Amino acid sequence: MPEAVDEMTKPDLAAAVPLSHRADGARLVAGYLDRAAQAVLADAVRAAIAAAPLYQPRMPRSGSPFSVRMTNCGALGWVSDEAGYRYQPEHPLTGAPWSPIPEIALAAWAELTGYPAPPEACLVNWYGPQAKMGLHQDRDEQAFDAPVLSLSLGDTALFRIGGTSRKSPTRTVRLASGDAVLIGGADRLAFHGIDRILPGTSTLLPEGGRINLTLRRVTPPGRTGDPVVNSGR
Ligand code: MD3
Ligand code: FE
């Protein structure tokens, strides 16, 4: 079993998690957002969707649709269609800029990652009861030193994570509403996916389903007009 997978643990309280620097491995912070914070974040996601509607991404080349619908917040959004995977500043269908990343998500990034620059991208994945996401690596970013932070809202998901080879053994972890997952270091290029959603496991979203926010640094800090944060570079 890859070491990184063994490091996935469930601390009792978010407050008990050491506020370290970069994640080395994959770490589940169960119950990181309390119910009130989840509700505020869900409202912010609804506002972001109103500004930049959910759309159905398509696979490069084949054009086959994803079962997950997506939108983004932040300066750069991850999009996928026949032309490929990429980050871009505008919605692929409306051409509108993405809305700002919600405050609560920015605060979670600062607290959990300690990374010396804010995230540029916040992918919003919306899963209906039948949606899933196949095993894949996240490798469309230039800043591989930066961790990735995921926040889950709504119904519980069965999340699968393996190693850096598609053939590595995998482990399944349940991601519930309010859970945070921090991925960095050795696990930044681990294969992962969502096998299925467990409908009816959360009352947060009246319409049901699951929302995942994935916060990422896309470009190395210091070139994009970020506030300078004593990075020593
Ligand atoms: C492990 N999203 O958008 S988030 C994705 O729940 C994605 O919607 C899933 O995979 C979701 O790319 C999983 C947790 C996550 C995010 C990034 C990772 C796990 C990761 C990058 C490397 C390894
Ligand atoms: Fe991913």
Image (cartoon, rainbow, N blue to C red):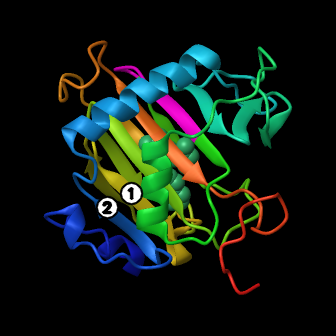
Q: Quadrant of residue 36?
A: top left
**In the rendered image of this protein, does residue 14 appear above or below residue 172?**
below
220 horizontally vs 129: left or right: right
Q: Is mark 2 within 8 Å of ligand 1?
A: no
**SS at mark 1 in the image:** strand
Q: Residue at x 50, y 51 (%)?
A: 106
The answer to whether mark 1 and mark 2 are in CB contact below 8 A is: yes
* Residue 217 picture location, percent across and down: 66, 58
- Determine if the magenta segment contains residue 124: yes
**In the rendered image of this protein, does residue 78 appear above or below residue 184?**
above
Query: In which quadrant of the rendered image does the C terminus lie?
Result: bottom right
178 horizontally vs 225: left or right: left
Foreground residue, 40 or 131?
Answer: 40
Q: Quadrant of residue 61?
A: top right
Query: Marks 1/2: CA distance?
Result: 5 Å
Marks 1 and 2, the one that precedes in the sequence: 2
Q: Residues within 10 Å of mark 1 (few under 14, many from 20)?
A: many
Q: Is mark 1 within 8 Å of ligand 1?
A: yes
* Residue 97 picture location, percent across and down: 75, 27
Q: What label does residue 28 carry, if any?
A: 2
**In the rendered image of this protein, does residue 1 appear above or below residue 107?**
below
* Residue 220 picture location, percent across and down: 76, 67
Q: Is residue 136 shown to the viewer in this render?
A: no
Q: Quadrant of residue 209?
A: top left
Q: Which residue is mark 1?
A: 181
56 horizontally vs 30: left or right: right
Segment colored magenta = 123-130
Q: Amino acid at mark 1?
A: Val
Q: Residue at x 54, y 76 (%)?
A: 185
Q: Residue at x 17, y 63 (%)?
A: 13
Q: Amino acid at mark 2?
A: Leu
**Chief secondary structure of the magenta portion:** strand
